[in-house]
């Protein structure tokens, strides 16, 4: 039953794609209003992308190819010259009755040819080139938006690492306070030397973890500058990402007889639009092969020529008329003509047509697969976001309980009713649970950001939205 529902979704979404010519209206610099807070940085990231990515050149190449196809409708102008030397001899029953002297002639000609009709192949080539241009443009926009999304994810990752470092620094302060307290108790005789060594060991361990976290933070900042050409703003706040965390998408994708806004969003995803444009391109290419089975051609031709005798006026022997007697040293001709031809069933036509049909079929299958992948990606991301938010509630309760236990153990240790190792264990549990909660919140942010950009910016969700921090 589920497979049938998926098939119905694909069919309906294909119909939606037929009705939406939204790709022509997309602007690569069109950012959602929610990203306005990063506008100055976005301009720098976009400039760095334009300088490092080849998609801009590929788009320009496709535009040039389209213009080249359109130029085939322009007339063709050609000029020629022919310099010759020859002689004519006239015979009657193998008896020479006359001849012309050897003469040198110069022939000049101009030809203007205008393609009127070429079996529709030129229009189909233009259509295919325009589809390729649209596909190249969409691929550029997709690359740019993926680049910006990666930048946002890396910025969020730096903020997450700053939180982790803050937790380690707080744990380090607690370990230092515990070490001072243990030192006072040891000097007063309330604790043994072993308890003091335990506090010192815990302090060194926490300081080492803080150093690792700080090094990781610096590596993330360095990688940000290397990949995007922009420094991390240490004054930036994590609050800018709360607009993504609080985003609540629809839980499920429902497609019935009425097309919902959610299905329209799915149909307008950039990867789906690219797959459909490539199908249109291959269909247009296939039409060229089909028209080759019967390929009429019609051209308008205008010609003008001039022949000039370089040896002066010479009369042929045995000639009577003035024209044939050579009483001229040049001649001029012009002509206007419609030239038509038709080619029936070239040898490879049927093979080309069948090859084109198979390519169209493969393209349609790829288009359907992109729709299925989009549906699966959105549904999986929503499900994972829902599970992450449930896990977050449990983690928040765990942190609250662990914090209370740590405070009670602190009071009991100060009162001399609890050993130092249990207090150290409580501090370790609290630090670990706080970092675990921060990681869950970071994963929630990435998942919610993916769905937000999918809905607002036509970006397909990433197949893997889990954090990739070292």
Image (spheres, rainbow, N blue to C red):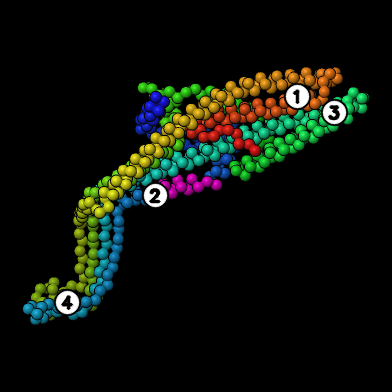
Circle 4 crowding by C-alpha within 10 Å: few under 14, some 14–19, many from 20: few
> Of the numbered discs in the image, which one, if any, rests on residue 65?
2
Residue 346 in the figure: left or right of residue 246: left
Q: Mark 3 or 4 closer to N-term?
A: 4
* Residue located farthest toward the left when viewing the structure as drawn: 93
Mark 3 and mark 4: span between their CA atoms?
126 Å
Residue 83 in the figure: left or right of residue 129: left
89 versus 374 height, above or below:
below
Mark 3 and mark 1: span between their CA atoms?
15 Å
Residue 193 in the figure: left or right of residue 250: right
Q: Mark 4 or 2 closer to N-term?
A: 2
- The nearer-to-camera label among 3 and 1 is 3
> Of the numbered discs in the image, which one, if any, rests on residue 426?
1
Residue lying at 92% horizontally and 27% vertically, measured from the top left: 187
Q: Mark 4 or 1 closer to N-term?
A: 4
Circle 1 crowding by C-alpha within 10 Å: few under 14, some 14–19, many from 20: many
State the residue position of label 3.
195
Residue 235 in the figure: left or right of residue 56: right
Mark 1 and mark 2: span between their CA atoms?
68 Å
> Of the numbered discs in the image, which one, if any, rests on residue 88?
4
- Chief secondary structure of the magenta portion: helix
14 versus 330 height, above or below:
above
Mark 3 and mark 2: span between their CA atoms?
78 Å
Which segment is the magenta one?
Answer: 52-66
- The nearer-to-camera label among 3 and 2 is 3
Q: Secondary structure at mark 3?
A: helix
Task: Give the quarter of the figure containing the C terminus.
Answer: top right
Q: Secondary structure at mark 1?
A: helix
Residue lying at 16% horizontally and 75% vertically, measured from the top left: 326
């Amino acid at each position: 039953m589920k497979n049938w529902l998926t098939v119905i979704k694909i069919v309906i979404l294909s119909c939606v794609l037929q009705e939406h010519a939204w790709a022509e209206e997309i602007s690569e610099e069109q950012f959602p209003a929610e990203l306005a807070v990063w506008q100055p940085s976005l301009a720098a990231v976009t400039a760095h992308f334009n300088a490092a990515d080849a998609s801009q050149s590929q788009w320009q190449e496709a535009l040039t190819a389209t213009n080249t196809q359109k130029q085939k409708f322009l007339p063709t102008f050609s000029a020629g010259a022919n310099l010759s030397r020859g002689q004519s001899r006239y015979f009657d029953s193998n008896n020479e009755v006359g001849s012309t002297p050897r003469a040198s002639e110069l022939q000049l000609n101009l030809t203007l040819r205008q393609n009127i009709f070429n079996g529709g192949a030129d229009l189909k080539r233009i259509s295919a080139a325009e589809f390729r241009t649209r596909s190249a443009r969409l691929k550029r926009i997709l690359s740019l938006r993926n680049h910006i999304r990666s930048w946002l994810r890396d910025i969020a990752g730096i903020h997450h690492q700053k939180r982790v470092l803050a937790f380690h620094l707080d744990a380090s302060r607690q370990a230092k306070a515990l070490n001072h307290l243990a030192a006072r108790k040891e000097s007063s005789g309330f604790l043994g030397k072993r308890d003091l060594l335990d506090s010192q060991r815990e302090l060194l361990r926490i300081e080492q973890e803080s150093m690792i976290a700080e090094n990781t933070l610096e590596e993330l900042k360095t990688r940000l500058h290397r990949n995007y050409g922009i420094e991390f703003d240490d004054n930036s706040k994590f609050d800018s990402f709360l607009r993504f965390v609080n985003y609540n998408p629809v839980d499920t994708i429902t497609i019935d007889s009425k097309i919902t806004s959610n299905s329209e969003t799915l149909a307008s995803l950039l990867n789906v639009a690219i797959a459909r444009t490539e199908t249109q391109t291959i269909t247009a290419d296939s039409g060229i092969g089909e028209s080759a089975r019967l390929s009429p051609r019609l051209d308008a031709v205008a010609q003008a020529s001039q022949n000039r005798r370089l040896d002066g006026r010479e009369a042929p022997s045995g000639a009577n008329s003035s024209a044939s007697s050579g009483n001229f040293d040049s001649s001029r001709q012009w002509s206007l003509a419609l030239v038509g031809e038709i080619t029936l069933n070239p040898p490879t036509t049927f093979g080309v047509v069948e090859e084109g049909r198979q390519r169209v079929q493969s393209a349609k299958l790829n288009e359907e697969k992109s729709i299925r992948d989009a549906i699966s990606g959105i549904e999986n991301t929503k499900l994972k976001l829902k599970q992450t938010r449930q896990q977050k509630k449990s983690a928040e309760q765990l942190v609250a309980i662990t914090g209370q236990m740590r405070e009670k153990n602190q009071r009991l240790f100060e009162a001399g009713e609890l050993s130092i190792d249990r207090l150290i264990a409580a501090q370790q549990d609290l630090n670990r649970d706080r970092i675990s909660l921060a990681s869950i919140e970071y994963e929630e942010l990435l998942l919610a950001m993916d769905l937000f950009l999918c809905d607002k910016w036509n970006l397909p969700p990433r197949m893997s939205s889990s954090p990739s921090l070292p």
